[in-house]
Amino acid sequence: MMLSVQMLRVWGSISFVSVLAVAGEVLIASGMQQLGDLDDLRASKGTVGTVLAVIGNGKFFSGALCMAFNFFAMLFALSIADLSLAAPAIASLTYIGNAFAAQWFLHEKVDQRRWLATGFVAVGVALIAR
Amino acid sequence: MKHALKPSQYAVLVAIMLTASVGDSLLARGMGQVGQVDMHHLGLLWQALFNPFVDAGIVLLIGFFACYTTALSWADLTFVMPATAFGYVVIALLGRFWLHEQLSPSRWAGIALIVCAVGFVAGGPSRTEHPELDQMDAGVGR
């Protein structure tokens, strides 16, 4: 019973960190999608104007906030889970979660090629980070 | 809508791969010199800011974030993702050929899988076309 509660805490924290990372990356991607090609933006607004446009974008700001929370949540997760489990598990779950979220929320066309790549990356990262 | 990337955009993707991996390695090296930070030794975080490896790592990670957001402005998240994962390959190969560390067969397998993933994605379009969403976004952005 104790073991299952501990397992629940470990996997709960790993999932929480992964969800925050996915939310952060999808919000940032959505914000950048909204702004369009930064090279074009720089041509019209200049470098400072582009930086201000990026920072002032609500989705980008929320995404960056999620990434900041993700950093602290990661520290918390590492205090209750082994690094050798948490690091590859969080990285793999984040890559898979990103693919689903990109399809659902960003309406990206995740074709077979990209699903295969996502699977390979998730397994590859887990193997390297072990 | 562009599907093929310009040379400068490939350069941004390569910068993503290199800055993340080298930046992380520099931070790890710097923090190794600073020592273990816990709730009772939070002052060490201030000291860490004066470590040259930590400073170089922070500069590279800021560069990574700038390149990453730039890439997301012209490519899909699922296109850029394998490029970020390639950083793990760079770290592993740096360890093997620069620090002469031994890589286990499972690590070599991981490297092969990520290289294949980058190859799969690089062969496809960099961005999904959705004109109706682009129009909506342009309206929201105004």
Image (cartoon, coloured by chain):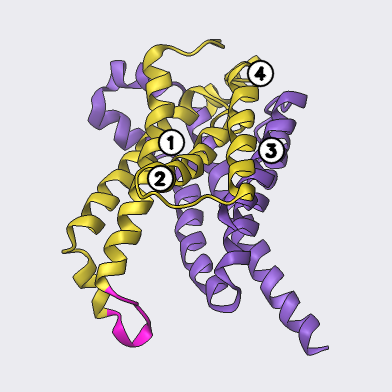
Chain colours: A purple, B yellow
Mark number, residue B17? 1
> Viewer-nearest of labels 4 and 2?
2
**Marks 4 and 2, how far apart at CA:** 33 Å
Q: Give the range drawn in magenta.
A: B35-42
Q: Are marks 2 and 3 on the same chain?
A: no
Mark number, residue B130? 4
**Marks 2 and 3, how far apart at CA:** 19 Å
Three-letter code for the amino acid on which mark 3 is drawn: Phe
Which residue is pictured at 58% across the width and 28% down the height?
B118
Three-letter code for the amino acid on which mark 4 is drawn: His
Residue contact at pointers 4 and 3, CB within 8 angstroms: no
Residue contact at pointers 1 and 2, CB within 8 angstroms: yes
Q: Do labels 4 and 2 share a chain?
A: yes
Which residue is pictured at 29% across the width and 16% down the height?
A43
Left or right, B84 with respect to A5, comes to: left
Question: Residue at label 2?
Answer: B21
**Marks 1 and 2, how far apart at CA:** 7 Å
Question: Residue at label 3?
Answer: A120
**Marks 1 and 3, how far apart at CA:** 17 Å
Q: Are marks 1 and 2 on the same chain?
A: yes
SS at badge 1: helix
Which residue is pictured at 30% across the width and 35% down the height?
A51
Three-letter code for the amino acid on which mark 2 is drawn: Ser
SS at badge 4: loop
Q: Are marks 4 and 3 on the same chain?
A: no
**Marks 4 and 1, how far apart at CA:** 28 Å
- Asked whether the viewer can see residue B141, the reply is no
Q: Earlier in the sequence, mark 4 or mark 2?
A: 2
